[in-house]
Image: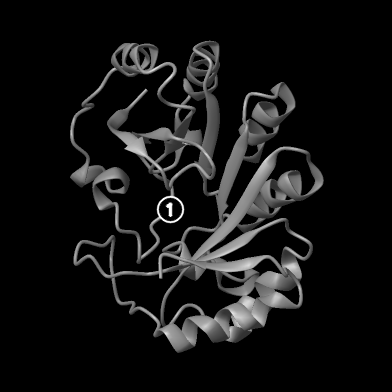
Amino acid sequence: MRIAGIQKLTLLDYPGKVACTVFLSGCNLRCPYCHNPALVLPERRAAQSLSEAEVLAFLAQRRGKLDGVCLTGGEPTLQPELSPFIQSVRRLGYAVKLDTNGTNPRLLRALLRDGVLDYVAMDIKNAPERYTESCGGVAVLPQVQESAALLLEGTTEYEFRTTVCKPLHTPREMEAIGRWLKGAKRYFLQAFADTGDLVSGGVQPHTYEELLRLRQAVLSHIPNTQLRGI
Protein backbone atom coordinates (compact mmCIF):
# COMPACT_ATOMS: atom_id res chain seq x y z
CA MET A 1 0.00 0.00 0.00
CA ARG A 2 1.34 3.44 -0.95
CA ILE A 3 1.46 5.42 2.28
CA ALA A 4 2.69 8.97 1.73
CA GLY A 5 2.78 10.07 5.36
CA ILE A 6 1.04 10.35 8.70
CA GLN A 7 -0.21 13.22 10.84
CA LYS A 8 0.38 11.85 14.29
CA LEU A 9 -2.30 13.89 16.04
CA THR A 10 -5.45 15.61 14.82
CA LEU A 11 -8.45 16.96 16.68
CA LEU A 12 -10.19 18.02 13.45
CA ASP A 13 -10.12 15.17 10.92
CA TYR A 14 -12.24 12.70 12.90
CA PRO A 15 -15.29 14.31 14.55
CA GLY A 16 -15.37 13.70 18.28
CA LYS A 17 -12.15 11.70 18.47
CA VAL A 18 -8.47 12.20 19.13
CA ALA A 19 -6.99 10.65 16.03
CA CYS A 20 -4.14 10.39 13.59
CA THR A 21 -4.45 10.74 9.83
CA VAL A 22 -2.81 8.38 7.36
CA PHE A 23 -2.30 9.80 3.85
CA LEU A 24 -2.52 7.33 0.97
CA SER A 25 -1.07 8.23 -2.41
CA GLY A 26 -2.88 8.20 -5.74
CA CYS A 27 -6.18 9.56 -7.04
CA ASN A 28 -8.34 8.90 -10.09
CA LEU A 29 -9.72 12.46 -10.26
CA ARG A 30 -8.10 15.75 -11.25
CA CYS A 31 -10.19 18.34 -9.44
CA PRO A 32 -8.66 21.71 -10.33
CA TYR A 33 -8.94 23.08 -6.79
CA CYS A 34 -7.24 20.09 -5.12
CA HIS A 35 -4.47 21.27 -2.80
CA ASN A 36 -2.74 17.87 -2.52
CA PRO A 37 -1.07 17.52 -5.95
CA ALA A 38 1.77 15.49 -4.45
CA LEU A 39 -0.79 12.80 -3.56
CA VAL A 40 -2.68 13.03 -6.85
CA LEU A 41 -0.41 13.65 -9.82
CA PRO A 42 1.82 10.70 -10.84
CA GLU A 43 4.71 12.98 -11.79
CA ARG A 44 4.61 14.60 -8.35
CA ARG A 45 4.32 11.51 -6.19
CA ALA A 46 7.30 10.74 -4.03
CA ALA A 47 8.39 7.20 -3.26
CA GLN A 48 6.49 5.49 -0.47
CA SER A 49 7.61 7.10 2.76
CA LEU A 50 6.08 4.66 5.25
CA SER A 51 5.35 0.95 5.23
CA GLU A 52 2.20 -0.63 6.63
CA ALA A 53 4.32 -2.23 9.34
CA GLU A 54 5.68 1.15 10.41
CA VAL A 55 2.21 2.67 10.65
CA LEU A 56 0.83 -0.29 12.59
CA ALA A 57 3.82 -0.17 14.96
CA PHE A 58 3.12 3.52 15.61
CA LEU A 59 -0.54 2.78 16.29
CA ALA A 60 0.38 -0.04 18.67
CA GLN A 61 2.49 2.40 20.66
CA ARG A 62 -0.30 5.01 20.78
CA ARG A 63 -3.04 2.77 22.14
CA GLY A 64 -4.79 4.55 24.99
CA LYS A 65 -3.76 7.96 23.67
CA LEU A 66 -5.50 7.94 20.29
CA ASP A 67 -9.11 6.93 19.67
CA GLY A 68 -9.28 6.70 15.91
CA VAL A 69 -7.53 6.60 12.58
CA CYS A 70 -8.54 8.67 9.57
CA LEU A 71 -7.61 7.20 6.19
CA THR A 72 -7.41 9.87 3.52
CA GLY A 73 -5.66 10.63 0.26
CA GLY A 74 -5.55 10.93 -2.62
CA GLU A 75 -8.25 8.30 -2.85
CA PRO A 76 -7.86 5.42 -0.37
CA THR A 77 -10.17 3.01 -2.18
CA LEU A 78 -7.69 2.73 -5.06
CA GLN A 79 -5.42 0.73 -2.77
CA PRO A 80 -6.04 -3.02 -3.16
CA GLU A 81 -4.68 -3.66 0.33
CA LEU A 82 -7.08 -1.21 1.99
CA SER A 83 -9.50 -3.74 3.49
CA PRO A 84 -6.89 -5.93 5.26
CA PHE A 85 -5.11 -2.79 6.47
CA ILE A 86 -8.34 -1.49 8.02
CA GLN A 87 -8.86 -4.83 9.72
CA SER A 88 -5.34 -4.64 11.16
CA VAL A 89 -6.05 -1.15 12.48
CA ARG A 90 -9.30 -2.27 14.08
CA ARG A 91 -7.57 -5.21 15.77
CA LEU A 92 -5.47 -2.63 17.59
CA GLY A 93 -8.67 -1.19 19.02
CA TYR A 94 -9.09 1.89 16.85
CA ALA A 95 -12.19 3.36 15.26
CA VAL A 96 -11.70 3.96 11.53
CA LYS A 97 -12.85 6.92 9.45
CA LEU A 98 -12.59 6.73 5.67
CA ASP A 99 -12.36 9.78 3.43
CA THR A 100 -13.45 8.92 -0.10
CA ASN A 101 -14.55 10.47 -3.38
CA GLY A 102 -17.13 7.70 -3.77
CA THR A 103 -15.86 6.35 -7.09
CA ASN A 104 -15.45 2.76 -5.87
CA PRO A 105 -18.92 1.78 -4.64
CA ARG A 106 -18.13 -1.93 -4.89
CA LEU A 107 -15.39 -1.67 -2.26
CA LEU A 108 -17.36 0.81 -0.17
CA ARG A 109 -20.31 -1.59 -0.12
CA ALA A 110 -18.06 -4.43 1.05
CA LEU A 111 -16.49 -2.34 3.81
CA LEU A 112 -19.90 -1.19 5.03
CA ARG A 113 -21.27 -4.73 4.88
CA ASP A 114 -18.34 -6.04 6.91
CA GLY A 115 -18.83 -3.33 9.54
CA VAL A 116 -15.19 -2.20 9.52
CA LEU A 117 -15.90 1.51 9.05
CA ASP A 118 -17.08 3.69 11.91
CA TYR A 119 -17.40 6.91 9.93
CA VAL A 120 -17.30 7.85 6.25
CA ALA A 121 -16.66 11.33 4.88
CA MET A 122 -17.62 11.42 1.22
CA ASP A 123 -16.71 14.25 -1.11
CA ILE A 124 -19.46 15.57 -3.36
CA LYS A 125 -17.72 17.51 -6.09
CA ASN A 126 -20.71 19.33 -7.55
CA ALA A 127 -24.23 19.09 -8.89
CA PRO A 128 -24.73 16.17 -11.30
CA GLU A 129 -24.72 18.35 -14.42
CA ARG A 130 -21.30 19.78 -13.55
CA TYR A 131 -19.74 16.70 -11.98
CA THR A 132 -17.38 15.73 -14.77
CA GLU A 133 -16.18 19.32 -15.15
CA SER A 134 -15.46 19.54 -11.42
CA CYS A 135 -13.48 16.29 -11.50
CA GLY A 136 -11.10 17.60 -14.15
CA GLY A 137 -12.92 15.88 -17.01
CA VAL A 138 -13.17 12.44 -15.40
CA ALA A 139 -16.67 10.92 -15.75
CA VAL A 140 -17.60 9.14 -12.51
CA LEU A 141 -21.11 10.35 -11.64
CA PRO A 142 -22.91 6.95 -11.70
CA GLN A 143 -20.38 5.44 -9.28
CA VAL A 144 -20.62 8.46 -6.99
CA GLN A 145 -24.41 8.33 -6.98
CA GLU A 146 -24.29 4.67 -6.02
CA SER A 147 -21.90 5.38 -3.14
CA ALA A 148 -24.01 8.27 -1.89
CA ALA A 149 -27.08 6.03 -1.87
CA LEU A 150 -25.20 3.43 0.18
CA LEU A 151 -24.53 6.00 2.89
CA LEU A 152 -27.99 7.56 2.79
CA GLU A 153 -29.66 4.16 3.10
CA GLY A 154 -27.20 2.59 5.54
CA THR A 155 -26.51 2.76 9.27
CA THR A 156 -22.85 3.80 9.33
CA GLU A 157 -22.17 7.35 10.50
CA TYR A 158 -21.27 9.63 7.61
CA GLU A 159 -20.99 13.13 6.29
CA PHE A 160 -21.06 14.61 2.83
CA ARG A 161 -18.83 17.57 2.06
CA THR A 162 -18.13 19.87 -0.86
CA THR A 163 -15.14 22.13 -1.32
CA VAL A 164 -16.68 25.17 -2.98
CA CYS A 165 -14.95 27.63 -5.29
CA LYS A 166 -15.70 30.07 -8.09
CA PRO A 167 -16.76 29.59 -10.84
CA LEU A 168 -17.76 25.95 -10.22
CA HIS A 169 -20.21 26.45 -7.36
CA THR A 170 -23.13 28.86 -7.38
CA PRO A 171 -26.45 28.74 -5.47
CA ARG A 172 -27.95 26.93 -8.46
CA GLU A 173 -25.46 24.06 -8.17
CA MET A 174 -25.83 23.90 -4.40
CA GLU A 175 -29.62 23.69 -4.60
CA ALA A 176 -29.25 20.80 -7.05
CA ILE A 177 -26.90 19.02 -4.64
CA GLY A 178 -29.44 19.55 -1.87
CA ARG A 179 -32.16 17.92 -3.95
CA TRP A 180 -29.85 15.01 -4.75
CA LEU A 181 -28.83 14.37 -1.14
CA LYS A 182 -32.13 15.40 0.46
CA GLY A 183 -32.40 14.16 4.04
CA ALA A 184 -28.65 13.63 4.57
CA LYS A 185 -27.60 13.59 8.23
CA ARG A 186 -24.92 16.23 7.80
CA TYR A 187 -23.40 18.22 4.97
CA PHE A 188 -20.42 20.55 5.09
CA LEU A 189 -19.42 23.27 2.68
CA GLN A 190 -15.67 23.69 2.85
CA ALA A 191 -14.20 27.00 1.81
CA PHE A 192 -11.58 26.67 -0.91
CA ALA A 193 -8.27 28.29 -0.02
CA ASP A 194 -5.69 28.92 -2.73
CA THR A 195 -2.43 27.47 -1.43
CA GLY A 196 -0.61 28.35 -4.64
CA ASP A 197 0.01 24.63 -5.23
CA LEU A 198 -3.06 23.17 -6.90
CA VAL A 199 -3.72 20.39 -9.39
CA SER A 200 -4.59 22.84 -12.16
CA GLY A 201 -6.12 25.97 -10.70
CA GLY A 202 -8.29 28.48 -12.54
CA VAL A 203 -10.56 28.81 -9.51
CA GLN A 204 -11.06 31.39 -6.78
CA PRO A 205 -12.38 31.40 -3.21
CA HIS A 206 -15.82 32.74 -2.34
CA THR A 207 -16.34 35.64 0.01
CA TYR A 208 -17.97 34.93 3.36
CA GLU A 209 -21.22 36.47 2.13
CA GLU A 210 -21.16 34.23 -0.95
CA LEU A 211 -20.57 31.18 1.23
CA LEU A 212 -23.64 32.08 3.28
CA ARG A 213 -25.70 32.22 0.10
CA LEU A 214 -24.42 28.82 -0.98
CA ARG A 215 -25.42 27.36 2.37
CA GLN A 216 -28.83 29.00 2.20
CA ALA A 217 -29.47 27.32 -1.15
CA VAL A 218 -29.09 23.88 0.45
CA LEU A 219 -30.89 24.34 3.76
CA SER A 220 -34.42 23.52 2.65
CA HIS A 221 -33.22 20.06 1.57
CA ILE A 222 -30.48 19.39 4.16
CA PRO A 223 -31.17 21.39 7.34
CA ASN A 224 -27.92 20.26 8.93
CA THR A 225 -25.69 22.07 6.42
CA GLN A 226 -22.72 23.84 7.94
CA LEU A 227 -19.76 25.90 6.80
CA ARG A 228 -16.35 24.46 7.58
CA GLY A 229 -12.92 26.07 7.48
CA ILE A 230 -14.21 29.63 7.79
Could you say where residue 136 lies in the image, as x and y percent from the top left?
A: 41, 63
Position of 123 relative to 110 (above/below): below
Visible residue check, residue 170: no
- Number of other residues with Cα within 10 Å of mark 1, as a class: few under 14, some 14 to 19, many 20 or more: many
Q: Which residue is mark 1?
A: 29
- Front in this rendered view, residue 109 or 86: 86
Could you say where residue 45 lies in the image, as x and y percent from the top left?
A: 22, 40
State the count of labels.
1
Could you say where residue 57 lies in the image, as x and y percent from the top left?
A: 33, 11
Report the amino acid beneath label 1.
Leu
Among all residues in the image, which is located at the extreme front?
64
Colouring mode (rainbow / by chain / secondary structure / one colour) = one colour
Position of 35 relative to 91 (above/below): below
Could you say where residue 133 lies in the image, as x and y percent from the top left?
A: 48, 70
Q: Is residue 34 left or right of residue 161?
A: left
The C terminus, quarter of image: bottom left
Visible residue check, residue 3: yes
Q: Is residue 138 left or right of residue 104?
A: left
